[in-house]
Amino acid sequence: MNTLKNYFIAKTALLFLAGLFAVPSLEAQIPQWYLDGRSSDYSPPTYIVGVGEARNLNEAHNIARASVGSQIRVQVDSEITSVTREIETNGQFNFESDFKNATTSKVDETMQGLEIVKQTEHAGMYYAMVALNRESYLLGIRSDLQSLQADYNDLVTRGENSINEGRIFPGITNYLDAQNLTSEFYALMATYNALSEVPYGAGDELGLGNMVTEI
């Protein structure tokens, strides 16, 4: 009887020690917010979230930021196609590639409100989460759009006045300067409309098609 009792005591002790030194699964060691790609504190639609994993913390941050940028660009591409269909008349113009190229740079420039909200390290790997507040992001873009639209309208008005006064070359110069603003404007407008429930505008908001014809 004592032998049997000792056996069960020894076995219980061994199981207890095994539990103490057991190695948890790799998945359990990786932060859950990284595995899920989201967090209850930073959830859509309020936030656009990206996560990154790398061997150094800075690289993990960069990967997470790139993830946010790519999510935005995917939504913007289809919006740009829609906008350019309204501007391009009878196949006379081709603005889509210009607008898409401008979008790539403008998305990167306008993500100033991106925050590093979570980060951790485990077994030599760094994990990071960044979040972009959608409303704050849209507010900044709307301000830029209003400024660009005002500059565009001013240049077009000056161009029209110069041409009416017979000063053709200064007038065309103003028109061309205005046209140079359009790629940035429509790239930003497409970004805004892709992410906002209420669009800033639709189609040829600046009258670009008519202005190019006038030139």
Image: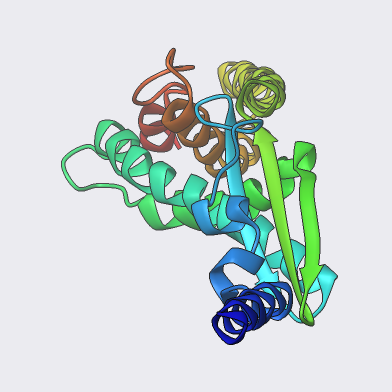
Q: Give the image location of residue 90, x and y in percent.
A: 16, 41
Residue 82 position by quadrant: top left
Residue 131 position by quadrant: top right
72 in relation to 146, above or below: below
Residue visible at 58% across and 24% down? 46
Which one is nearer the viewer's eye here, 44 or 72? Answer: 44
> Which residue is at the far top?
198
> Which residue is at the far front?
1
Q: Give the image location of residue 45, x and y in percent.
A: 50, 26
Which one is nearer the viewer's eye here, 123 or 204? Answer: 123
Residue visible at 51% across and 36% down? 191
77 in relation to 197, above or below: below
Which one is nearer the viewer's eye here, 192 or 59? Answer: 59
Residue 133 position by quadrant: top right
- The number of numbered badges drawn on the structure is 0
The answer to whether 135 appears left or right of 189 in the picture is right
